[in-house]
Each structure stands twice: as structure tokens, then as C-alpha cells.
Amino acid sequence: MIDSRKIEAERFVVLVKRTAEPLNKKLVDAIIGRKLEEEGEKLGVTVRESHSVNGEFAWMLSFTAPDLETAKKFCEAIHAIYYGHISSLQLLQVVFLLRWVV
């Protein structure tokens, strides 16, 4: 389990809703090249998990960031990297962990 107080970072989850726009080479190259992780490192963000999900949202990321302002900047980076392929983002700040299963 990650103790946010010990690593001086807050935990966040972002839910991503896609557009109907098909993937293109530029987007695939950004995914394969881990562009998002590179941008996150510049901001002090660490992506912990990334999931493709079924439902209203298509993608879910769990990450740590120094603060809410940095998390919002990271969401702006997500929009920029995947421009035209994201219809909306929902940023959630984890208040406390209820249960951790290993």
C-alpha cells in the first residue's frame, strides 16, 4: 500500500471518456512511446495504474502528484497528448483508502 504522507504526494484517479474518432499513427506512437509518462515525470506525477474499462468511461488512470494543482496540469497534458480523442475527463482525488487487496 502507498502511504501518501510518506512520499509527500496525493493520490488521484482520472476517468477518461473517448470520442468516436478512430486511432491514428500519431496517437499510437504517443501511447507506445509512453509520452504521457514522460510529461508526468516533468510535473512530478507518477502513473501507478492504467486500465481500459467498459462503461461510460473507456480509460482509468491512477497516479500520484504533489498536489491538486499539479494533478490538474497533468489532466491538461492528457488532453493535449490525446487531442481529438478525449471527450471529457473526470479527476478524482483519493481522500483515504478503504481497502487494499494484494
Image (cartoon, grey):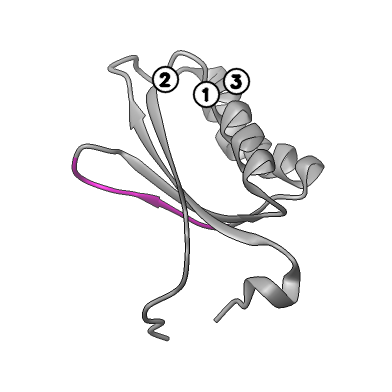
Q: Looking at the image, do the residues carrying marks 3 and 1 touch, with CB atoms under 8 Å apart? A: yes
- Residue shown at 47%/64% (left/top)? 95
Q: Main secondary structure of the magenta part?
A: strand
Q: Is residue 88 above or below residue 39?
A: above
Dot 3: what SS? helix
- Residue shown at 67%/35% (left/top)? 35
Is disc 1 surrounded by few (<14), some (14 to 19) or many (20+) residues within 10 Å?
A: some
Q: Which residues are magenta?
A: 48-55
Residue labelled with disc 3 = 80
Residue 99 on image: x %, y %? 37, 81
State whether residue 19 appears in this view.
Answer: yes
Gap in Å between the C-alphas at discs 3 and 2?
A: 10 Å
Please indicate whether residue 79 sits to the left or right of residue 87 in the image: right
Gap in Å between the C-alphas at discs 1 and 2?
A: 6 Å
Q: Residue type at mark 3? A: Ala
Q: Residue type at mark 2? A: His
Residue 93 on image: x %, y %? 49, 53
Q: Residue 82 shows which numbered tag?
A: 1
Q: Is residue 80 above or below residue 57?
A: above
Queried whether the magenta region covers residue 53, the answer comes back as yes
Residue labelled with disc 2 = 85
Gap in Å between the C-alphas at discs 3 and 1?
A: 6 Å
Dot 2: what SS? loop
Queried whether the magenta region covers residue 34, the answer comes back as no
Dot 1: what SS? loop
Quick one: quadrant of the N terminus? bottom right
Is disc 3 surrounded by few (<14), some (14 to 19) or many (20+) residues within 10 Å?
A: few
